[in-house]
Image: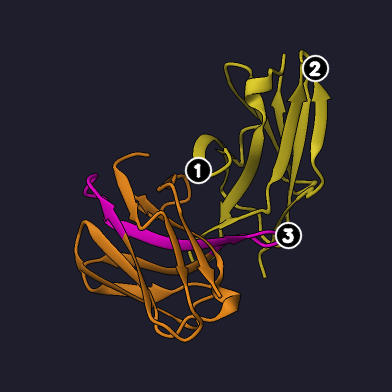
Amino acid sequence: SQKIEQNSEALNIQEGKTATLTCNYTNYSPAYLQWYRQDPGRGPVFLLLIRENEKEKRKERLKVTFDTTLKQSLFHITASQPADSATYLCARRNQGGKLIFGQGTELSVKP
Amino acid sequence: DAGITQSPRHKVTETGTPVTLRCHQTENHRYMYWYRQDPGHGLRLIHYSYGVKDTDKGEVSDGYSVSRSKTEDFLLTLESATSSQTSVYFCAISEGVEANEKLFFGSGTQLSVL
């Protein structure tokens, strides 16, 4: 099966620090990895995607890396703020073309 | 939420009763999906649609059926609800299914089966 795994333990960090979330996948390398943000009581919202031949992608304070050797993507939020507190999901298309999601990592940024 | 409306937002029902959840989109996207989200499992695909009257199963389709009679509406039916179907259900849409296509989600329906 084509699994995608995220650290299910919540990540607690101090405001201003960099948050780093991990996404690991198995089997064949996806052409893209996607990252979503989900707030309580809401549906996920797309943030960023990174292509397999891109080492790094940035959007404002967000940075995503993609390491096909390690089969891993890292999601960084620099200068984190309490408003960044949410659950972050990574996702990939499986060989059938369906988008499958990791369990998500809950991030809590304390002032 | 990108022109996606789910109804109802909350529902409590009894075991054995039929339940229908509705997803309505105003984006004219071809693809529509139903996911359920549970602690420890994340989002799992139930069914999806690739056009009017064209649907297919996802990874957790047992006990669920879907219908899509119009581009904008995608219905999820639990023929006889069970307690294991207590979950948060999300509808999503996309323009295509290429690897870089993103999904847009509705706000979800919290379903409790007692």
Label 3 SS: loop
- Chain A, hue in figure: yellow
Residue A11 sits above or below residue B90 on the image: above
Q: Which residue is mark 1?
A: A42
Q: Which residue is mark 2?
A: A17
Question: Please, what is the three-letter code of the amino acid marked with disc 2?
Answer: Lys
Nearer to the camera, B99 or B4: B4
How far apart marks 2 and 3 lie (CA) works out to 30 Å
Kindly identify which numbered label has been placed on residue A26. 3
Chain ID of residue with mark 3: A
Question: Few, some or many C-alpha atoms within 10 Å of disc 3 (few <14, some 14-19, many ≥20)?
Answer: some
Residue B76 sits above or below residue A6 on the image: below
How far apart marks 2 and 1 lie (CA) works out to 26 Å
- Chain B, hue in figure: orange
Query: Foreground mark, 2 or 1?
Result: 1
Residue A1: percent from left, percent from top: 67, 71
Q: Main secondary structure of the magenta part?
A: strand
Give the quarter of the figure containing the C terminus of chain A. Answer: top right
Q: Earlier in the sequence, mark 3 or mark 1?
A: 3
Chain ID of residue with mark 1: A
Question: Please, what is the three-letter code of the amino acid marked with disc 1?
Answer: Arg
Query: Foreground mark, 3 or 1?
Result: 1
Residue B70: percent from left, percent from top: 17, 64
Nearer to the camera, A98 or B77: B77
Q: Residue at x 74, y 31 (%)?
A: A108
Q: Is residue A74 magenta?
A: no
